[in-house]
Image: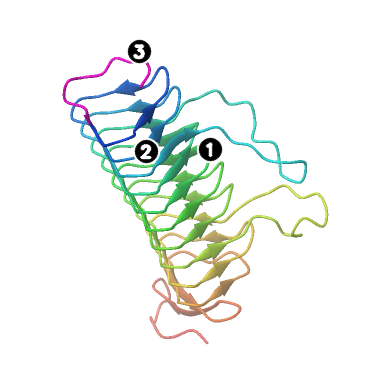
Amino acid sequence: MSDNNSIPNSLILGKNVVIEDNVHFGENVTIGHNSVILEGTYIGDNVSIGANCVLGIRPGGNKKMRKPGDSVHSLHIYPNTKIGNLVSIYTAVVIHENVFIGDHASIRENVSVGSGSVIGRGAMVELNSQIGKNVTVQTLAYVTGDTILEDNVFIGPCVSMSNDKYMGAKEFTLKGPHIKKGAKIGNNASLLPGVTVGNNTIVGAGSVVTKDLDDNSTFAGVPAKMITSQISDNKEDIK
């Protein structure tokens, strides 16, 4: 532990915890065994961090990967957040209050997670993504880079998203899905780059979303097609 940190008496540390310089701790923070808190990380009051976590990671890469950018912002974890075991969170991430992050989850740089949200066990949130308030990202879901999840969105287990239309074959502005308020995505659904899912729309399990989906509707299939619309006059199934 560095001498350059102000350590409150209420901090509870497990065995073999590493804390680098210029880490801020609020009151009543708990850190599990073998976790590493990297330089500049800010941790608010009543935050619980599990064992074997690494927080505040600086991004790396190689020539095939896009450059991570020049952001110097630190990881900022707001009060009352709970982080499980074996979690990795990069720098330039903001985790707002009352968030729960499950075991084995990973959150890349330049991501914001809104208050009251849940990032499930083994879920992956890639860089430059925005997650709103009270969002649920369930077990093993993959949120690709450059994605927007608005407030109250539900992402089921093993949902997969993509942001590269040409899969690296040629230049393309990377853009993940934009999922609007209250939308729900069923387990194992796949969303292609740049698609928009409308407000309060439901996507059935196993569906493949290839184009924008209207508000207040239900879609299912491969490719996903509308099966009901809450805004239709007769409320009947739409074939």
Q: In the displayed structure, would residue 205 be above or below residue 239?
A: above
Mark 1 burial class by Cα count in 10 Å: few <14, some 14-19, many 20+: many
Magenta span main SS:
loop
Residue corresponding to mark 1: 109
Q: Nearer the viewer, residue 203 or 146?
A: 146
Cα distance between the residues tagged 2 and 3:
18 Å
Q: Where is residue 220 in the image (x, y as percent from the top left)?
A: 50, 79
- At horizontal 44% and vertical 22% (from top left) the residue drawn is 40
Q: Which mark is residue 3?
A: 3
Mark 3 burial class by Cα count in 10 Å: few <14, some 14-19, many 20+: few
The reply to whether the magenta stretch includes residue 41 is no
Quadrant (top left, top right, bottom left, bottom right) of the N terminus: top left
Give the left or right position of residue 65, taking residue 209 as reference. right
Check disc 2 and report its element: helix, strand or loop.
Answer: loop
Q: Residue 218's quadrant in the figure?
A: bottom left
Mark 2 burial class by Cα count in 10 Å: few <14, some 14-19, many 20+: many
Q: Nearer the viewer, residue 4 or 25?
A: 4
- At horizontal 67% and vertical 40% (from top left) the residue drawn is 61
Cα distance between the residues tagged 2 and 1:
19 Å
Residue corresponding to mark 2: 35
**Foreground disc of the pair 1, 3:** 3
Q: Give the range drawn in magenta.
A: 1-12
Q: In the displayed structure, would residue 11 be above or below residue 147?
A: above
Counting residues from the start of the chain, the first of labels 2 and 3 encountered is: 3
- At horizontal 64% and vertical 35% (from top left) the residue drawn is 68
- At horizontal 43% and vertical 50% (from top left) the residue drawn is 150
Q: Which amino acid does label 3 sit on?
A: Asp
Check disc 3 and report its element: helix, strand or loop.
Answer: loop
Q: Residue 192's quadrant in the figure?
A: bottom right
Q: Which amino acid does label 1 sit on?
A: Glu
Counting residues from the start of the chain, the first of labels 1 and 3 encountered is: 3
Q: Position of residue 78 (x, y in %)?
A: 31, 32
